[in-house]
Amino acid sequence: MLSPSAIRIGLIAISPSLLFAQPARAENGDGFYITAGAGFQHDDNVFRTASNDPAGRSRQSDDITTSSVGLKWDKSYSLQRFQIEGNVVDYRYRSLDNLNFTAHNYSAAWRWNVTPSVHGNLSADRKESLSSFADFTGYGVRNIRTEENRHFDAVFEVTGGWRLLAGANRQKLSNSELFIEEGDTQLDTVEGGARYDFRSGSSLGYVMRTGRGEYFNRHEPLPATQLDNRFDQREHEMRLVWPITAKTTFDVRAGYLERDHAHFSDRDYSGSYGNFDVTWDVTEKTSVMAGVGREMNSYQSAYSSYAISDRFSVSPLWQITAKTALRGRYDYIRRDYRGAISDSPLIGRSDTIQAALIALEWQPLRTVLLSASLQNGRRSSNRDGFDYHNTIAGVSARLAF
């Protein structure tokens, strides 16, 4: 719950690197791999400009090319497993070349085991991306968003199906440009809990988290805008994973979050969050993932301190042949902005976001993945200037050796 990253949930069309997220099957298992990729997309509304834009700005379209190269190492030694992956992705805009940038991403993990009954994970990752102009309103300004995570967790298999859980985490978010609503934030948390694993494959667990956060580029609180420089956060979360049949699995999460700021209590918020997701393997070649959920995230402005997002999503997959697959996704989100700290005509802002994707993938060789996609996104709001719609069409190719 560090940042309003969930604010972009369902906005499939914002990322030119979407199709690079689909791994080629050549990368499965132990070994060392090199990946390379290229893609092309046409975005008909890069800045997510409203048709009734208050500043009179017009929609701008552009062609975006991407190229990437990556390395991946995955190796097991006795009870230990090590995974390292890094890639460089270059984004080039045909007309809006001030948005050009190169992302440097990595992830590393040690899946450690002291004994078969004492095990866990030690991991780190970093991801760079261009902030979506659906949220970042600096029209035409390139804001590079960097997310970093450091994570440790441990599982102690006590007796029978009982497991004791412990962990620590650091999340860090930074922006290359000033982004007040999101802010440059670091959140350090520790957690503990318990889980029971049933012989049927189901599990039920509880975790409590507590953490201290800071806005590390804001050394002092700002009374005029009630922007704080640190906060405390607590969470209680329960999770149930239930494979009700061999083809259907429920994943249910329910939690309660509290965030208290050090100096400005008007920015405090609390409430429930969670999700109810189902995965259904309809046939050997078709499956569907669907779910509903609620997220709560910080969004600091004059008219809000946080946002609540209620979403519905569905993602069907049709494995047409062994080498060809058709994917789809639809998201519907209702987002309400709450916790105003001063008078503003935007108090009570409420948005409805819809996003849809269809993608065709073809893997003619074990090392080659080709994709074509069509995406559509739209937002409607009860406040002027926040409506937009956009369409993205793209193709990509990815190689894995």
Image (spheres, rainbow, N blue to C red):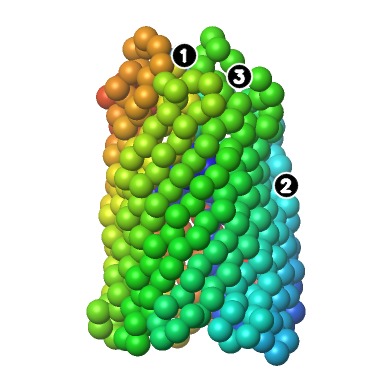
Asked if 14 appears above or below 36 in the picture, the reply is above
Is residue 3 left or right of 123 when viewed as pictured?
Answer: left
Is 346 in front, or is 257? 257
Tell me if label 2 and label 3 are in contact, CB under 8 Å: no
**Residue occupying image coordinates x 56% and y 53%:** 190
Q: Quadrant of the C terminus?
A: bottom right
Relative image position of residue 249 (x, y in whole percent): 30, 75
- Label 3 sits on a secondary structure element that is loop
* Residue, disc 1: 55
Relative image position of residue 98 (x, y in whole percent): 69, 32
What whole-number distance in Å separates the C-alpha atoms at marks 2 and 3?
33 Å
Relative image position of residue 317 (x, y in whole percent): 36, 71
- Asked where in the image residue 96 lies, by quadrant, the reply is top right
Q: Tag 3: residue type?
A: Pro
Q: Tag 2: residue type?
A: Thr
Q: Earlier in the sequence, mark 1 or mark 2?
A: 1
